[in-house]
Image (cartoon, rainbow, N blue to C red):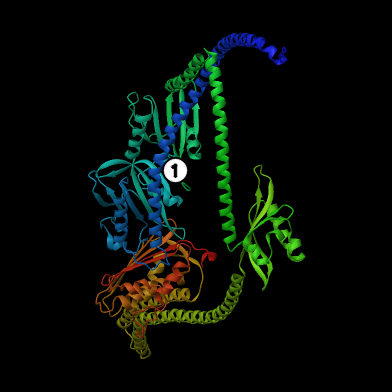
């Protein structure tokens, strides 16, 4: 039996497929090669076009990059210069604070001049960049002992404390007195801040009470002019100017910095300049083509540029010829800005830009060459695509692994955060915008005895009473409205009653800046509140006690002031009594002479009358009578005029001392009358009183107060100064300036001990207690002087050297000015 094999229809197509598939593959390869060739040509053309466009854009970008590089040069210079000057500012400011603190009234530390010198010397040794460190004090502003230090090291001829410690050419540190600080500001300097006079470093600070950085100016050291940058800070105590603290930097330091940066970074034709706030050239680079001296200090002529320097505004401009860059150099609050100015010809900028452009285009050409080479064959391109797909798949796999690791790390981080939240003693929670809890920590659950399921998704109204819930909600809404962290005091119920919490509440924002929740951190301050209440009660009790004690002290002070006023009045009346006694003694002499002359005249009249009655009077008797009477009458009139003059002087001085009336008077004339009234005190002694006062000095003062000042000073010398001295001398020198009367009082007495001198103006300070001294004399003088506007008194003395007192009073005093 023949068996028929049936062929499956699907196998009938195999021979056709075997023929068609190679043909299709061949056609596909041919088509691919044609497509690749066309694509290659298009890619080459496109790459060339793109390269040209990129070249044009990069040329412009290169010019900007070149400008930015030069701007960075200016910034680098500014930062380095700023660092050096700010170091000096910091040191000088600290020095001024230290010296000011030494002079504070409430600082009971006796710091001598040697201590200040040690500070300055150590400061200079510790800062090798500094040329000098110094301090200048106003007359007697340091310790009231200037006279004792005249011409000492670091002092001028008046003893003024002006130490200047500087580093010489060999590096040794030397001390000299500061020079030229008394030279006043010139009119030119007042109009042009770029003009710096020899005394400006001190006078400008004294006038403005503001710190300055002054440069460049020339200071003479070792008979050489040295260009310096001076940082000068005022020494102020209660806004009263006592002097300055300063540091000098050599201009050469900045010059070396500028030269180094210019030679290392800047093209040859570039100019790098450091300008002061006035536009003065502090330092500038020197090139072969521009050999102008780098220490030129002329004022910059560009007014607009100077304004930009003062304002601290950066500036950059590239015109057809030049690139100009200004970088501010700021020293901090209270100081004017300086500037670093860079200029460079445009051609040099373009040379730099061309170099940058070539480097950029080299990379572009490499990319272009790479594309041309790779586009020559499509097989490589297709292979590259396949490899890229494989690499992409590997990248996806690595990314998935990385995400898995990050997710695991995130879970660990969340676990650590939750552990932190659960172990803190603070209550931490988060609510959505509807007030539903999104998260609470373990402390929250423990306090209110609930589980997480009972809290999350619920509001305060479901967990607390309505009153408490309303307050919580109001505080949450307040934090949402404020859009920032707020601090609120809240009360929450607990097992033992209400507890007080201080809560920090703040809104939370998503990536789009939308608020989605509020978060709170609450800390229990119940115990602290209780302690505060106890402290407040204690403070109230203390204030009550202080008030009662203050009342007692006020009453005691009032009694003391009344007693002191009575003592002062007694002192005045005692002085008036002394004046009366002295005048009485002085008037007795001319009145006695007049009485003798009158008695003699009476006798001759009685004798002549007797002769006349007896009719025995002769012509010779009449001539004798007339001659004798003329002589007696002359003696009588002379002595009576003298008595009248003394009484008038007494009347004027005594009325002035017992009445308070402002009037004008001639100082020399009035002083002679006051001193005349004191002359009886000098009788029976070898002491003398010398007045040096020009005529025509007229003042408007209270003459009684003026007389009492002089009387008290003279009596102090007689009672205290000349104790045990046979021949004492008092010199009173009077002068005036445009606004003030100046009294210079000096005696050659035994002087004053230092401990007494420190308290000389205090009431009841006397070395004659129990011997008639009340101790109010100098206190009265001090009060009478200082009550006048501008009134000032200065007392200097040392044992065996006498007393030197300087007094300043206004020439014209108004009634409403006497305090």
Whether residue 295 is visible, yes or no, is: yes
Q: Residue placed farthest to the front in the image? A: 1
Crowding at dot 1, Cα within 10 Å, few <14 / some 14-19 / many 20+, comes out as: few
In front here: 56 or 390? 390
Q: Is residue 471 above or below residue 580?
A: above
Q: Position of residue 431 (x, y in %)?
A: 69, 55
Question: Quadrant of the rendered structure where residue 506 is?
Answer: bottom right
Whether residue 185 is visible, yes or no, is: no
In front here: 634 or 709? 709
Q: Position of residue 54 (x, y in %)?
A: 53, 19
Q: How many marks?
A: 1
With 128 as the anchor, is 435 left or right in this view? right
- Residue beneath disc 1: 190
With 744 as the anchor, is 391 left or right in this view? right
Q: Residue placed farthest to the left in the image? A: 170
Q: Is residue 635 above or below residue 45?
A: below
Q: Is residue 425 above or below residue 18?
A: below
Q: Secondary structure under badge 1?
A: helix
Question: Quadrant of the rendered structure where residue 786 is?
Answer: bottom left
Q: Position of residue 4 (x, y in %)?
A: 72, 13
Q: Position of residue 206 (x, y in %)?
A: 42, 52
Q: Is residue 591 above or below residue 501?
A: below
The residue drawn where x is 28% and y is 80% is 684
Which quadrant holds the N terminus? Answer: top right
In front here: 743 or 390? 390
With 746 as the anchor, is 310 left or right in this view? right
């Amino acid at each position: 039996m023949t068996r028929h094999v049936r062929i499956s229809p699907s196998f009938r197509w195999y021979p056709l497929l075997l023929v068609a598939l190679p043909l299709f593959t061949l056609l596909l390869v041919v088509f691919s090669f044609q497509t690749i060739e066309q694509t290659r040509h298009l890619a080459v053309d496109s790459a060339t076009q793109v390269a040209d466009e990129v070249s044009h854009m990069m040329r412009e970008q290169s010019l900007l990059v070149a400008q930015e590089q030069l701007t960075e040069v200016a910034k680098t210079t500014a930062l380095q210069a700023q660092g050096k000057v700010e170091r000096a500012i910091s040191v000088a400011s600290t020095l001024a604070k230290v010296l000011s603190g030494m002079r504070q009234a409430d600082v009971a530390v006796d710091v001598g001049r040697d201590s200040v010198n040690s500070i300055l010397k150590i400061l200079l040794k510790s800062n090798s960049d500094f040329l000098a460190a110094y301090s200048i004090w106003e007359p007697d502003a340091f310790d009231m002992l200037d006279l004792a230090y005249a011409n000492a090291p670091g002092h001028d001829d008046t003893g003024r404390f002006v130490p200047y410690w500087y580093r010489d050419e060999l590096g040794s540190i030397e001390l000299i007195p500061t020079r030229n600080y008394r030279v006043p500001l010139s009119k030119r300097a007042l109009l042009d801040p770029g003009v710096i006079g020899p005394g400006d470093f001190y006078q400008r600070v004294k006038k403005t009470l503001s710190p300055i950085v002054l440069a460049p100016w020339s200071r003479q050291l070792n008979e050489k002019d040295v260009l310096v940058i001076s940082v000068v800070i005022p020494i102020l105590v209660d806004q009263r100017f006592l002097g300055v603290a300063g540091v000098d930097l050599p201009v050469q330091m900045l010059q070396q910095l500028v030269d180094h940066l210019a030679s290392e970074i800047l093209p040859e034709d570039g100019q790098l300049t450091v300008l002061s706030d006035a536009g003065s050239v502090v330092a500038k680079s020197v090139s072969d083509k521009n050999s102008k001296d780098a220490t030129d200090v002329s004022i910059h002529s560009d007014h607009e540029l100077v304004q930009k320097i003062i304002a601290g505004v950066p500036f950059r401009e590239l015109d057809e010829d030049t690139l100009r860059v200004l970088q501010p150099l700021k020293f901090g609050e209270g100081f004017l800005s300086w500037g670093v100015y860079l200029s460079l010809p445009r051609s040099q900028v373009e040379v730099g830009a061309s170099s940058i452009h070539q480097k950029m285009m080299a990379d572009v050409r490499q990319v272009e060459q790479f594309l041309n080479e790779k586009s020559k064959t499509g097989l490589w391109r297709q292979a590259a695509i396949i490899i890229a797909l494989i690499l992409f798949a590997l990248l996806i796999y690595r990314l998935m692994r990385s995400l898995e690791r990050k997710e695991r790390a995130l879970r660990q981080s969340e676990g650590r955060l939750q552990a932190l939240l659960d172990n803190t003693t603070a209550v931490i929670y988060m609510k959505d915008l509807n007030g539903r809890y999104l998260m609470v920590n373990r402390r929250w659950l423990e306090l209110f005895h609930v589980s997480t399921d009972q809290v999350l998704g619920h509001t305060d109204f479901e967990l607390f009473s309505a009153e408490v819930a309303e307050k919580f909600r109001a505080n949450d809404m307040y934090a949402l409205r404020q859009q920032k962290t707020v601090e609120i005091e809240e009360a929450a119920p607990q097992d033992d009653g209400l507890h007080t919490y201080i809560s920090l509440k703040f809104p939370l924002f998503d990536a789009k800046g939308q608020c989605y929740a509020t978060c709170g951190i609450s800390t229990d301050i119940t115990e602290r509140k209780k302690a505060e209440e106890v402290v407040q009660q204690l403070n109230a009790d203390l204030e009550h006690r202080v008030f009662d004690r203050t009342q007692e002290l006020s009453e005691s002070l009032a009694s003391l002031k009344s007693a002191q006023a009575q003592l002062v009045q007694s002192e005045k009346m005692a002085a008036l009594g002394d004046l009366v006694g002295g005048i009485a003694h002085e008037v007795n002499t001319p009145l006695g002479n007049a009485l003798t002359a009158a008695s003699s005249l009476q006798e001759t009249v009685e004798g002549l009358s007797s002769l006349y009655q007896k009719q025995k009077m002769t012509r010779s008797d009449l001539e004798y009578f007339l001659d004798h009477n003329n002589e007696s009458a002359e003696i009588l009139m002379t002595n009576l005029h003298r008595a009248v003059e003394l009484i008038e002087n007494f009347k004027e001085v005594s009325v002035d001392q017992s009445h308070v009336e402002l009037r004008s008077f001639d100082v020399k004339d009035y002083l002679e009358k006051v001193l005349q009234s004191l002359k009886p005190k000098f009788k029976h002694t070898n002491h003398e009183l010398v007045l040096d006062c020009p005529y025509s000095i007229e003042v408007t003062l209270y003459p009684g107060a003026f007389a009492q000042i002089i009387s008290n000073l003279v009596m102090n010398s007689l009672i205290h100064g000349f104790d045990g001295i046979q021949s004492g001398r008092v010199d009173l020198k009077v002068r005036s300036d445009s606004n003030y009367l100046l009294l210079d009082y000096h005696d050659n007495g035994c002087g004053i001990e230092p401990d007494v001198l420190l308290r000389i103006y205090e009431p009841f300070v006397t070395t004659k207690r129990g011997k008639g001294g009340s101790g109010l004399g100098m206190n009265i003088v001090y009060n009478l002087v200082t009550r006048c506007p501008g009134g000032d008194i200065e007392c200097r003395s040392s044992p065996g050297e006498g007393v030197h007192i300087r007094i300043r009073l206004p020439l014209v005093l108004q009634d409403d000015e006497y305090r």
